[in-house]
Image (cartoon, grey):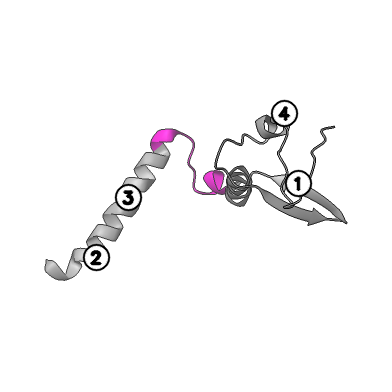
Amino acid sequence: MELAKITSKGQITLPIQIRKKLSLKDGDKVLFMEKDGRIFVENPTKLAILEAQEAFAGLAAELDLNTEEDVVNLCKEVRKEKWEKQYAHHA
């Protein structure tokens, strides 16, 4: 458990152990979330990445992407389709 003091301006300094656990550095922002009457402090960047990973969970299996090469090939295919669609009228 870590403790922080609130200044007269409502500011706090996050203890170093908390900053390390949240992977925060100078200039980073923090996100305050409420759940079941409790307040949580999160690293918004880290949280966004975790949410994206959860959102895409299982998608690789659905698309039969088993290797990094599969992902690269899919990206190439999508880029080719976009290129052809965008420049189809020039042909």
Point out the image quarter for the N terminus.
top right
Asked if the residue at tag 1 contacts the one at tag 2, i.e. Cβ–Cβ closer than 8 Å, the answer is no
The residue lying at 69 percent from left, 45 percent from top is: 42
Residue for badge 1: 7
Determine whether 17 is above or below 58 in the image: above
Residue 65 within the magenta-colored segment of the rendering: yes
Q: What element carries label 4?
A: helix
Q: Where is residue 31 in the image (x, y as percent from the top left)?
A: 67, 51
Verify whether residue 89 appears in magenta.
Answer: no
Q: What stretch is highlighted in magenta?
A: 59-69
Residue bearing the label numbered 3: 77
Which is more foreground, mark 2 or mark 1? 1
Q: Is mark 3 on a helix, strand or loop?
A: helix
Report the label total. Answer: 4
Q: Earlier in the sequence, mark 2 or mark 4?
A: 4
The quadrant of the picture occupied by the C terminus is bottom left
Pointers 2 and 3 in contact (C-beta within 8 Å): no
Q: What residue type is disc 3 on? A: Glu
Q: Which of marks 2 and 3 is nearer the N terminus?
A: 3
Mark 1 to mark 4 CA distance (whole Å): 20 Å
Distance of label 2 from label 3 (alpha carbons): 14 Å
Write down the residue under mark 2.
Answer: 86
Q: Residue at x 73, y 46 (%)?
A: 41
For badge 2, the amino acid type reads Gln
Between discs 1 and 4, the one toward the N terminus: 1
The earlier-in-sequence mark between 3 and 1 is: 1
Q: What element carries label 1?
A: loop
CB within 8 Å, label 1 to label 4: no
